[in-house]
Amino acid sequence: MSAQRGHRITNEELFDRACKVIPGGVNSPVRAFKAVGGTPFFVAKGKGSYLFDESGKRYVDYIQSYGAVILGHADGRVTSAVSRAASRGTTYGAPTLGEVALAELIVARVKGCDMVRLTSSGTEAAMSAVRLARAFTGREKILKFDGCYHGHSDALLVAGGSGVASLGIPDSAGIPRGAVENTVVAPYNEVPSLDSSYAAVIVEPVAANMGLVAPKADFLPELRKRCTESGVLLIFDEVITGFRVGPGGASVYFGVQPDMWCFGKVIGGGMPIGAFGGRREIMELLAPIGPVYQAGTLSGNPIATAAGAAVLSILNEESYEALERRAERLASGLTKAFSEAGIEAQVQRFSTLIGIFFGKEGVTNYLEAKASVSLDLYPGFFAGMLSRGIAFAPGPYEAVFVGLSHSTEDIDRTVEAAAEVAGQMAK
Ligand SMILES: *Cc1c(COP(=O)(O)O)cnc(C)c1O
């Protein structure tokens, strides 16, 4: 043993330190491993499909920052765009060419989305889209679907799926009744009845915060029809699906055009970002030309827009075909691994997105997702995979993110590991 290296810090030591100065040790709840047990690993660096923790352990990563890094970690084309931008200054509080370029890239790809405003997170995008929809319609009620997540703003957190769901907190403390009295929650995949008291319906066109639940064939077209009939604005929250299920996101994929969109994750290339957009007549109600106030010190940040523009310029039809082939290989491999071990599981894939549900039946809404999660098989699967160097999300309601950096070998290794873990679970 020649290499007597210095003591490497363990995840347990770091988590102890973190818990002293950060509530729960994390800056976003799902990262704390509460839903799966154990200690979170602290990432030292990422490269492509891999994460390396502070103790030096390598993981094949299917979290991919919840979909924010579609090209994989530390892609050279993105990191050089980031360092070029940073060398010119990190934020100015004045408009830049980079914001215009990213907005142009988005509107060019998303049919019907005439204008966008950039924010620093998806939460802000959804919150601002709702404010704008209320101003445009002069109405106050909004409808969201059970298990869809639209960020953590007061009015939208009800029945929010994702981390809220895996912690078993149906909503959140600290939200005044008044903030949600105009939010109506309806089951996903059922077209709700609407009337002229509603300003907007907000929906994840493919639900990716309650595992992965695809829309039934007529759900989105019928929802579009019903919204139009009642003068209700339809908002697609494409913070995950945007530029992930295809070059134009879900609205282009399905040929269903909402009135407004929310974006985030992919469009920032891993930097903090969000955007909301829509028809010109709606967007022009925003200050400074209209009466709806919305702002942000770091909105349209030059580093975030440079990273996002680099990513969107790289993605093309072939990227999505490649992504879908990988997702298909992983989904069918996992399905086979579970069925050969005699574990009842549904690996639900839609386009490039995957969700794993344990149980006999496919999942179409949040009630069914919760029933699957209550079987409590995910934590064992998660732990078995993690110990084999494969990181799925530390919560049963998160999607599996395959990226362009995952190789065939990564996927095949994942499937082999899943077969071992499923075999152990069956015992
Ligand atoms: C992640 C997410 C958000 C929130 O975005 P943040 O950048 O985390 O604030 C909103 N909607 C959907 C569908 C998301 O997946």
Image (cartoon, rainbow, N blue to C red):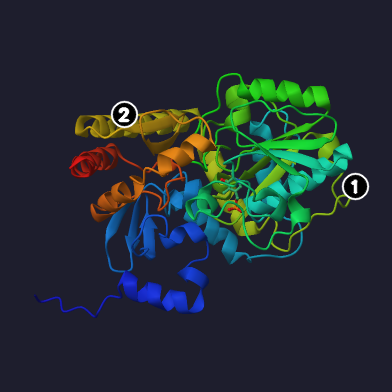
Q: Residue at x 64, y 58 (%)?
A: 302
SS assignment at label 2: helix
Which one is nearer the viewer's eye here, 338 or 360?
360
The verdict on label 1 being within 8 Å of ligand 1 is no
Instruction: Mark 2: give few (<14), some (14-19) or many (20+) Cα within 10 Å.
Output: some
Nearest to the eye among marks 2 and 1: give it. Answer: 2
Instruction: Mark 1: give few (<14), some (14-19) or many (20+) Cα within 10 Å.
Output: few
Q: Position of residue 299 (x, y in %)?
A: 70, 57
User: Does residue 329 lie above or below 29 as drawn?
Assistant: above
Q: Could you tell me how far apart the alpha carbons at marks 2 and 1 are, in whole angstroms?
A: 50 Å
| Label placed on residue 332 | 2
The C terminus, quarter of image: top left
The answer to whether residue 365 is left or right of residue 221 is left
Which one is nearer the viewer's eye here, 179 or 335?
179
Q: Tell me where residue 416 sits by quadrant.
A: top left
Please state which amino acid type lies under the numbered disc 1.
Gly
Mark 1 — residue? 290
Q: Position of residue 154 (x, y in %)?
A: 70, 55
The N terminus, quarter of image: bottom left
Please state which amino acid type lies under the numbered disc 2.
Ser
Q: Tell me where residue 387 sits by quadrant.
A: bottom left
Q: Position of residue 173 (x, y in %)?
A: 64, 61
